[in-house]
Amino acid sequence: MTDRLEGREKVTGTARYAFEYPVRNAAYAAAVQASVGKGQVRSVDAEAALRLPGVLAVLSCENAPELSDTSDGELALFQSRTVSFRGQFVAAVVAETLETAREAARLLRVEYAGEAPDVRLRADHPGLYKPDKVNPVFPADTEQGEPEKAFADSAVRVDAVYTTPAEHNNPMEPHATIAQWNEDGTLTLYDSNQGASTVQATIAKVFGLDPSRVHVVSPHVGGGFGSKGMPRPNVVLAAMAARAVGRPVKFAVPRQQMFATTGYRTPTIQRLRLGADEDGRLNAILHEVTEQTSTVKEFAEQTATPTRILYQAPHRLTSHRVVALDVPTPSWMRAPGETPGMYALETAMDELAVAAGIDPVELRVRNDTDREPESGLPFSSRNLVACLREGSERFGWAGRAPEPGARREGRKFVGMGVAASTYPAYQRPNQATARAEPDGTFTVRIAAADIGTGARTALALIAAETLKEDLADVRMEIGDSAFPRASVAGGSAGTAGWGTAVVRACEALRGKLNGAVPPGGIEASADTGEELRARAEYARHAFGAQFAEVEVDADTGEVRVRRMLGVFAAGRIINPTTARSQFIGGMTMGVGMALMEQSVMDREFGDYLTRDLAQYHVPVCADIRDIDAAWVEESDPHLNPMGAKGIGEIGIVGAAAAVGNAVHHATGIRVRDLPITPARLLQAL
Amino acid sequence: MRPFAYERATSAEDALRRHQDGAVYLGGGTNLVDLMRLGVEEPARLVDVAHLPYDQIELRPDGSLVIGAAVTNSAVAADRTVREGHPVLAQAVLAGASGQVRNLATVGGNLLQRTRCSYFQDAAKPCNKRTPGSGCPAREGEHHNLAILGWSDACVATHPSDMAVALAALDASIRIRGRGGERTIPIEDLYRLPGDEPQRDTTLEPGDLVTAVEVPALGVPSRYRKVRERASFAFALVSIAAALDVGDGRVRDVRLALGGVAHKPWRARRAEEALRGAEATEESFLRAAEAELEAAEPLRDNAYKVPLARNLIVRTLTELGEES
């Protein structure tokens, strides 16, 4: 139980975030967004803007320097006249002050040749296609046995379509960058991101630099949820602007502009078919997904992938179809793919439980498997059943009346729901160094990112344990591309991947230590690439079970979550304090997904209308009354030297389904379109 | 943000004098400053009136209240005389925004806050309220949370204030200091329906300064209920302010106002009329609600507000009936 090491800096305001670095002579950038949904920039009239005192430069497709690499359409800033979606950055102003920059941006006159954008995702869109792969490298489709026939022949069947809306990540700290070109031609970026090494490599390519000439500094990051996993246009804009004016440039994306330019979760349309025998044993699983990407860049989300691993069934089919619409580019958002996919699968499982007359916990236990159904690989460890049992016990599941609508307290319907969770236990190659200092302390470095997860603290604990030293004697340094290369903070792979490199570096250092440490210190380094390539083949995943109790107001359709419990099996938990925060943070985000989060697309103009946190609702403290997370001890020898699985995403996966299933149990109403709002429930109450 | 001048008024006369072309009064700024950042409001001059001596809540011997326009929302909600004598008002204020916003927001500013319709808030889109004659995309676009009563083809926006809904039910009056001197008007006469001039939220004339709200005594049970997707910090889907006086099983007096349904706080006069003298039963509450909502003309995506408003009226009156 270790407190966050940088907690004091954070609560006292001394922890420095990207926009706050005291660079000398900084100028400020403001971006102009396209006000048509599709078309061409006809002209950019900068005269009025340039007349404003304090304006240093205007950048647009009419004068922007050519970038060295434009293969990533999201980052090919101002490289063409084409407008691919409303809200795309089409110009920028650099000025002495932020206020002047914003005012000048307002004065910029951009003329367009506009066309009506095509922004509506639908299951019968003529542009739907099968992507070569879904994020990151999964096949788009899989099929085993005779799924259609097996489904038709099944005794108990569920055939339902679920939809989830677009959702936006909205970290507290906006995407922000300070770019500074140094006299030697190198570029320094103070940047808010989920991986300094990734930003370094990507931006170097975009500007045609050797990566060693780009230095990314990001020791503290105020959240990301995936949206900062890859550099977004803001980084390119800041660097381009700084070069244009020959001064450091600060650029933070205003909240309203984030909704078009920093990624979001694609909306989905998912058809689920489950066929089972009378005892609820699955015979056929078919999961067909429709989703969107932009015309700028393909992002095909892996929505149906958890269906490939969660339950046994001899006949199976999963598929992904994508359409490139005139919309902002979707990207990673906390468990991209798995989160909406598991909402649909675990709601369908609840519908199957109802159809078969079997307790939903029992149904899931009956369909457990010790091999990954589609690959046939053994699981490195799989304790889904233990989570379901432990959760049932702790939550008081046994007292639940099976039939929906049975429990009423005054004007409230009360119900309980359950859903399983699963998320892959990824690990990626990483490097780290460990140093013994002459004063008896140790310095461990890796370019990892702590986006609020507690990664810094977990890594320090891993280092101290490996070195067999006091935590107080270990200095953990992260968030800087000058440190050994690290994988991105994403895919719940941070602690597992970075931690392995830290262990190996610390082990190597211990091997070098005999006697006194010389004045220059002793350093050892590690690279886990080879170790990972040599790993045995196992299906590695974390599991969990989520339980929710909700009340639904009979008069208004308001849903409030009274209690929620997640029980997880995620290997060894390195630091219970920050782990619990991660779990309940994910669960809270799942409550938001179930009940309120949605980005509303305007069909006429083609942009997301919800553009701030007053309109885009995430849960507030008053919504999270009693939420708790627990975990089962899991010993898994096939993971990494810590025995740890990632936990950043397992908390959200399944959470929305648990809430939705509880709403059904409370009211007998099955809402298959998220979020479950009073408007949707009132129609049926 | 467009550059602007900032001045602090020292008295009502001073405020009026400073309120020249392109000037706007500034209270707590919790709405106005947001709109300035969005480029929706572009005043050349801000005249800060939050520090004028209108920061007291006065309880008069007859139980009525005079609430200064510069009193903060937090102070209204925390005031003992308000909580005891006019609970519907304290509840309405507490249902709005967050503690941080309520600490800054003022009564005058709260009453004059502008719609949160997303087309109004995006200066890059047409909006008759923001740019008269430019059109109303909400009518065919996203209007899930917009008006079902009293809207016009020019505008389907709703008024966002919770406090104003309670004040409408309480028969409050607004004290105004204008170029022609001081006047007091019923709150119903302050707000207007959109008609073909949706750019005008109120009947205020240029320079008019709201100085206080007068709230008559209330001797009967009252309450405010607000429906929203999350438990705090959200505008109402529908809200209700109600006060009910029941004697011998019959309704002696009733006050009802709805929020989130119209361009202004909607005083439910038809329902009130149907109820006065009627039996205080769920059946008559339902009949009254239906009488009021007969006038509702929901848009494509907000028909849910009709049963929601109906249920709220019935449930809130039933609960108040049980109290009285």
Image (spheres, grey):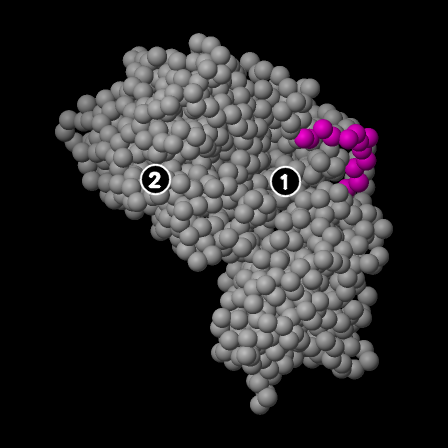
Q: What residue type is labelled 1?
A: Val
Q: Residue at x 70, y 69 (%)?
A: B269
Nearest the viewer among B95 and B169 is B169
Q: Identify the residue at the far left of this view.
A: A515
Q: Give the range drawn in magenta.
A: A107-120
Which disc number belongs to residue A566?
A: 2
- Tell me whether circle 1 and circle 2 mark residues in contact (CB < 8 Å): no
Mark 2 falls on what kind of element?
strand
Q: Which residue is drawn at 16% across and 31% down?
A: A516
Which disc number belongs to residue A412?
A: none
The percent position of residue B115, horizontal first and vertical second, equals 69, 56
Examine the rendered structure and indicate whether residue B76 appears above or below residue A542.
Answer: below
Nearest the viewer among B125 and B309 is B309
Examine the rendered structure and indicate whether residue B49 appears above or below residue B162.
Answer: below
Question: Gap between marks 1 and 2, in whole Å?
Answer: 30 Å
Examine the rendered structure and indicate whether residue B160 appears above or below residue B214.
Answer: above
The percent position of residue A14, horizontal first and vertical second, equals 42, 51
User: For the residue carrying disc 2, how many other residues have a C-alpha within 10 Å: few (<14), some (14-19), or many (20+)?
Assistant: many
Nearest the viewer among B173 and A179 is B173
**N-terminal of the two: label 1 or label 2?**
2
On-image quarter of the N terminus of chain A: top left
Examine the rendered structure and indicate whether residue B222 appears above or below residue A418.
Answer: below
Q: Which chain carries label 2?
A: A
- Residue A114 belongs to the span the image colors magenta: yes
The percent position of residue A468, horizontal first and vertical second, equals 18, 34
Position of A635 with respect to B82 (left or right) is left
Position of B322 with respect to A630 (left or right) is right
Q: Residue at x 55, y 79 (%)?
A: B247
Q: Looking at the rendering, which quadrant does residue A278 occupy?
A: top left
**Residue A653 in view:** no
Q: Name the residue under label 1.
A: A600
Q: Which amino acid does label 2 sit on?
A: Gly
